[in-house]
Amino acid sequence: MRRFYFIGFLVLVCFDTFAQVCFKLTANHAMPPEASLAWVLRVMSSPWVYCAIGCYIGAFVTWMVLLEHAPIGPAFAASHLEVVSVLALSVVLFDEHIGAPQLIGSALILAGIVCLAISETEGEPPAAAP
């Protein structure tokens, strides 16, 4: 079951992360931002917006499957890993700057996920012997 959780949350993080990256690429494609029909048409002509929508659908389906099986506390916390992955990818792909607040926030997210995972496994009964 742990493998299921690991693979499931990895897929969820990938879908969520790629969706955010696709929205950034869509925004870059649609520059400059303006309240006009021309801007809406630029957004709609970007293939990245459709990739983002597809990723959100994939993330939704993955999340629903995970919620059927995973404990809610760690599941909810792990669903926020995309904040850290998007932050890391934005440095690599978009030359974004990461400062101390972003690093501290990422560390707190990771620490929270670890704490919830540990507390969840401590409450599990020991595995039965075969």
Image (tube, grey):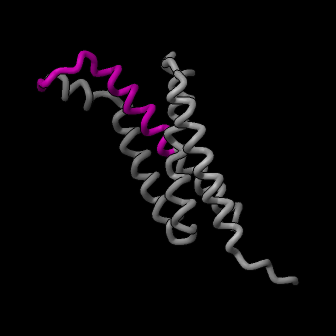
What are the residue bounds of the magenta stretch?
Answer: 15-37
Residue 74 drawn in magenta: no
Placement of the C terminus among the 4 image quadrants: bottom right
The relative height of residue 25 versus residue 20 in the rendered view (above or below) is above
Q: Residue at x 36, y 44 (%)?
A: 53
Q: Quadrant of residue 69?
A: bottom right
Q: Is residue 16 left or right of residue 120?
A: left
Q: Residue at x 53, y 54 (%)?
A: 77
The relative height of residue 12 versus residue 96 in the rendered view (above or below) is below
The relative height of residue 5 versus residue 28 in the rendered view (above or below) is below
Placement of the N terminus among the 4 image quadrants: bottom right
Question: Residue 36 location, x and y as percent?
Answer: 12, 24
Q: Quadrant of residue 128?
A: bottom right
Question: Residue 12 location, x and y as percent?
Answer: 53, 51
Residue 17 drawn in magenta: yes
Q: Residue at x 19, y 29 (%)?
A: 40
